[in-house]
Amino acid sequence: MPMRGSAPSTAADSGDPPEQVTSSALSPWAVAGGDLNAEFHIGLTVPGACYAWDASGGHAPTRLDVADDTGPSWATVDYDGHHADRFTVTQARPRRLWDEISAAYDRWDTLGRPTVDEYGLTVDAAGAHTAWVEGADGAREPVLPVGGTA
């Protein structure tokens, strides 16, 4: 399932971990710009992530807001309007969502950028679900949440 669009809240609560500001070469358009295949993989491997675009100019010429729809974590990725090779990333709260999204995108790229029709789901007799993607050699590779294990 692709990441859903919704407006995350970036209001800070006292006691939360401090915001972390870094930069990223990964374009926000690469992960949330309409590439269904990338968005599908990220949706599978970064559970609870939702996003919304902000082009109001209130923060940056273009901003991708990412939030955890089950918790308080959030991230923003700002395009300054000039440099398409470096983006300012701010993230806070327990999950570092942009780090998770970057790892998921890298994994998708390593898998050969599979298309949606190359994924499958196996349900065993006990009802456990395992998502997988078919590799070039025909083997099924488990698709797990970022940092997850089989």
Image (cartoon, rainbow, N blue to C red):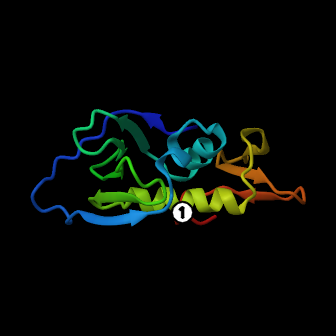
Residue 50: name its quadrant: top left
Q: Residues within 10 Å of mark 1 (few under 14, many from 20)?
A: some
Front-lying residue, 126 or 32: 32
- Quadrant occupied by the C terminus: bottom right
How far across and down, in percent of the image, does residue 128 sit? Answer: 64, 49
Q: Is residue 48 above or below residue 86?
A: above
How far across and down, in percent of the image, does residue 37 sit? Answer: 66, 42
Q: Residue at x 67, y 48 (%)?
A: 126
Q: Secondary structure at mark 1?
A: helix
Q: Amino acid at mark 1?
A: Ala
In the image, taking residue 124 as reference, residue 56 lies left or right, namely left
Residue 51: name its quadrant: top left
Residue 106: name its quadrant: bottom right
Q: Is residue 25 above or below residue 2?
A: below
Q: Is residue 65 above or below residue 142?
A: above
How far across and down, in percent of the image, does residue 3 sit? Answer: 50, 39
Report the residue that reaches farthest toward the front: 82
Report the residue that reaches farthest toward the right: 137
Front-lying residue, 140 or 65: 65
Front-lying residue, 1 or 78: 78
Residue holding disc 1: 103
* Count of numbered tags: 1
Q: Residue at x 67, y 58 (%)?
A: 109
How far across and down, in percent of the image, does residue 36 sit? Answer: 63, 37
Q: Is residue 125 above or below residue 19?
A: above
